[in-house]
Amino acid sequence: MEYLSHSASFHCWLNNAPSKPGIKQLGVLAVEHFGAIGHADWMVPALLFRFHDQEFQHLDLINERLLAGEAHEPDAEKEKRPGRTGDDGLAFRIDANGVITDILTLEAKCLTVSNTGIMKDAHEKLMVGGNRPSGVRELINLLTEYDTPEAQAWQQALLQFYRDGFRTAARHDGLAYAVGHSPKQPADRIAWLPPEAPHPAYTIQRNLEAMEFQFENLDAVVDILYRAA
């Protein structure tokens, strides 16, 4: 098993904003742009997380409370909502013959304050998945909405991958962990995720790429995105 951990710290710029939907997109785009598991040729044919009506309904309720002068605690238990079921994101490597050779399943978490319980939960969710990521079926259906040669080629590759029973590809895992502050103690600690080995909850023998994104002012970013601050 190979474990790779990376950490990045961002200032509060709009293009770095990790809303709950945004961190899922940020994670797969980071894999595609920076590479993962020792390879730089990962591709993301489409973003699985596009709409989450329940979250946007909740956001409207939060905005109404804030306008009324009420306090809001984003990490409070009562503010939690069921997440989107299935894979948060999928990235693929494909050979010259159009055959999928590797698949990376991404789990994404975004918190104002780092939480060891959520971190553990993310690793446990990755372990549950087998060689048949549920998001492949979603991608096949999603790509029918795009009438381009590239989308059609990806759909055919994914259909063949599905029909072959996912036997042609090696399965890898990825974790994108976004948090609104950085560790302070000890002074040499730069990340919340363990830098040398996977979380103890991750015991399966698969390659795992962990990415951590630290934002200096996450609340302000959310205000800019959703409240026109």
Image: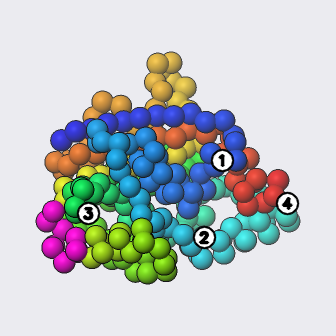
The magenta segment is 160-168
Image coordinates of residue 111 in percent, x first then y, are 55, 50
Task: Name the residue rendered at 82%, 53% in the picture.
Answer: 229
The alpha-carbon separation of the residues under discs 1 and 3 comes to 33 Å
The residue where tag 3 is placed is: 98
Label 3 environment density (alpha carbons within 10 Å; few <14, some 14–19, many ≥20): some
SS of the residue under disc 1: helix
Is 187 located above or below residue 32 in the figure? above
Task: Name the residue rendered at 75%, 54% in the picture.
Answer: 223
The alpha-carbon separation of the residues under discs 2 and 4 comes to 21 Å
The residue where tag 2 is placed is: 55
Q: Which mark is residue 63?
A: none
Mark 2 vs mark 1, foreground winner is 1
Q: Earlier in the sequence, mark 1 or mark 3?
A: 1
Q: Quadrant of residue 98?
A: bottom left
The alpha-carbon separation of the residues under discs 4 and 1 comes to 28 Å
Mark 2 vs mark 3, foreground winner is 3
Mark 2 vs mark 4, foreground winner is 2
The residue where tag 4 is placed is: 69
User: Is the Cβ of the residue at disc 2 closer than 8 Å to that at disc 4?
Assistant: no
Which is nearer the eye, 159 or 67?
159
Is 168 located above or below residue 10 in the figure? below
